[in-house]
Amino acid sequence: MKDIEAIEFIDRITPKNWIPCLDDNKLIDLFKNGFKKKSSDLSASLYIRFFIINEKNDDDTKRLGEHHGPMLFYNGFSSCEMWIYPHEGYEKDEITWQGTVIHELAHIAVDRLMAYRIKAHKGSTSLVNSIVYLDENPHGPTFQKALWRMLNRAFQVYGNELDEVYMEIEFDLDQYECFSDE
């Protein structure tokens, strides 16, 4: 997986106001030159700073990626980070990097939902982490619904190219049902 390939994938499957970027330079430019203006606070742009972390994750060798840290809210836009770790499964075709990206985008979607519910766009808070506000397992029903939606968005764009990803995420969802709060 190359970073630009992942950025293009994220850009194609996310809403128009979700803007992936490779580093903070894009955000710095935006601070200087202004942000994309939307019709309302609810449609404010979300800048996803994307990083491929080349070191192994010491905390958990099974971790493939993470929505790192809270979603940050500024005047007129929000930002978050997505980290993807190298994994030998990507080269062996045991797992897909696209599945990992879709999984992390679903976590971001849940944070965005929680931000909407607590009115973060109106200044109630500048940091949102759904784990704080959501009274369920991080991979519970709200996440599962977001994961299905993100997978369907990807499938609409890429179609049968994502058959392996679809099966991978379907398997993950079956595993998460064991942890469901329902």
Image: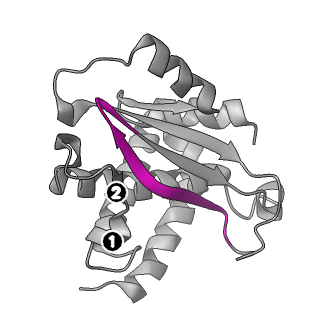
Residue positioned 72% across, 76% down in the render: 59
Give the class, few, some or many, for how many residues have Cα within 10 Å of label 1's Cα (few <14, many ≥20).
few
**Label total for image:** 2
Which mark, by number, is residue 128?
2
Residue positioned 67% across, 55% down in the render: 96
The residues colored magenta run 63-78
Q: Position of residue 39 (x, y in %)?
A: 17, 21
Of residues 25 and 96, the one nearer the viewer is 25
The C terminus sits in image quarter? bottom left
User: Which color scheme is applied?
Assistant: one colour
The majority secondary structure of the magenta stretch comes to: strand
Which mark, by number, is residue 153?
none
Q: Position of residue 171 (x, y in %)?
A: 52, 72
Disc 2 marks a residue whose amino acid type is Val
Disc 1 marks a residue whose amino acid type is Val
The N terminus sits in image quarter? top right
Tell whether label 1 touches label 2 (CB within 8 Å).
Answer: yes
| Mark 2 vs mark 1, CA separation in Å | 8 Å
Residue 60 lies left or right of residue 132; in this view the side is right
Residue positioned 66% across, 70% down in the render: 63
Vertical position of residue 3 compared to residue 67: above or below = above
Residue 180 picture quarter: bottom left
Residue 120 lies left or right of residue 45; in this view the side is left
| Residue under numbered circle 1 | 132
Q: Position of residue 97 (x, y in %)?
A: 66, 52
Q: Is residue 75 magenta?
A: yes
Q: Position of residue 166 (x, y in %)?
A: 51, 56
Residue 17 lies left or right of residue 21; in this view the side is left
